[in-house]
Image (tube, coloured by chain):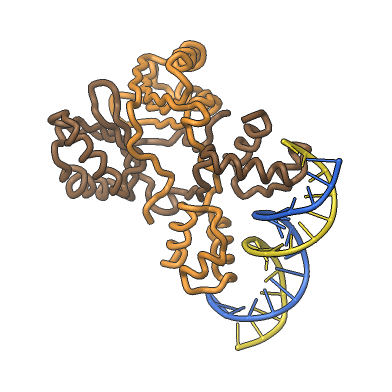
Chain colours: A orange, B brown, C blue, D yellow
Amino acid sequence: MDEIDKTILRILQKDAKITAKEIATQLNLTISPVYERIRRLEKEGYIKRYAAILDKELIGRSVTGLCQVSMQYHNAAFIDNFEKQIQDLEEVQECYHMAGQVDFILKINVKSLEDYHEFVRYKLSKIENIGVLNTTFVLKEIKHTSEFYI
Amino acid sequence: MDEIDKTILRILQKDAKITAKEIATQLNLTISPVYERIRRLEKEGYIKRYAAILDKELIGRSVTGLCQVSMQYHNAAFIDNFEKQIQDLEEVQECYHMAGQVDFILKINVKSLEDYHEFVRYKLSKIENIGVLNTTFVLKEIKHTSEFYI
DNA sequence: GATGAAATTAAACCAGG
DNA sequence: CCTGGTTTAATTTCATC
């Protein structure tokens, strides 16, 4: 993982559809080493996948809620069960087990407040052992990037 | 935006490197309409961009903190200034203006707790008009996806 | 590790229904 | 809107340094 690798990763984070030729030009290299480095970065897991990033307003997922969840009982079985169930909820964009007073924080994306209500009523609160639920809504997204600085 | 478009978006969210030919096979279509639909979905903004998703452990950004920020004064000029400054902080992965007691919630990714300390000390707290800062750290990432269900 | 060329495959374009 | 063929360009492989 030298500077050339890092530059390649920086470029691919911004635009995964760029050609090896263009990257090679930026790095004053030929296509082959760029190609081989990308393959290696994929193989070694630095690049997990390539994704199309969609516009959540246009696809109708513009309501974002951050939901703090605390468990009633904190034994491993309940925690594991919660984590497994969360994986299958398509409204859950992110979920973190937290240090501090609150056990989990979830980022939820839905079409409307009505859909949020339905999500909590029929999906989230059906999970066993949930103690406290506390949601705050996003008024405005200031920044959201998939790029890491490297 | 018909069912074919939605299926294409679902596929591209999971794997942006898939060929038009493979998508065409899955949809029982030829390459041309798939190609044209993707181009249209890009042009109309449904697809914002294509990104390489990196492994944050491997690139050394494995510490995630959620930071609640409240402003001292709530006039527009201060808020705008805060939002502009946040854009340039490379440690900030996400930032939301929230409804409720707290003004902003930031998701921060850094290499270590020491780096987090430096981030707060030398970058975040240098921004004018910050009142309260309150960080909780992620113990475990349960779910994190860029895919929306459509 | 890199170059440069050759082979393979995909993207991009277009005439026609 | 789709089919199918053509052109153009990128990916992938490989011999060589």
In front of the other: A11 or B67:
A11
Residue sitting at 46 percent across and 30 percent down?
Answer: A57
Q: Which x, y percent locates residue D1?
A: 72, 36
Could you tell me which quadrant the C terminus of chain B lies in?
top right
**Horizontal side, residue A71 vs residue B21: left or right:** left
Q: Quadrant of the N terminus of chain B?
A: top right
Task: Report x, y in % for residue B65.
Answer: 31, 38
Left or right: D7, with A25 as reference point: right
Q: Residue at x 17, y 46 (%)?
A: B121
| Identity of the residue drawn at 23% across and 37% down | B80
A66 w.r.t. B29: above or below: above
Q: Position of residue A8 (x, y in %)?
A: 47, 61
The answer to whether one can see residue A80 in this image is: no
The single residue placed furthest to the top in the displayed view is: A121
Q: How many marks?
A: 0
Location of residue A55 in the rendering, given as x and y in whole percent from the top left corner: 49, 36
The reply to whether residue A100 is in sight is yes
Q: Nearer the viewer, residue B33 or B93?
A: B33
Q: Is residue A100 above or below residue B115?
A: above
Q: Is residue A49 left or right of residue B78?
A: right
Residue nearer the viewer, A128 or A60: A60
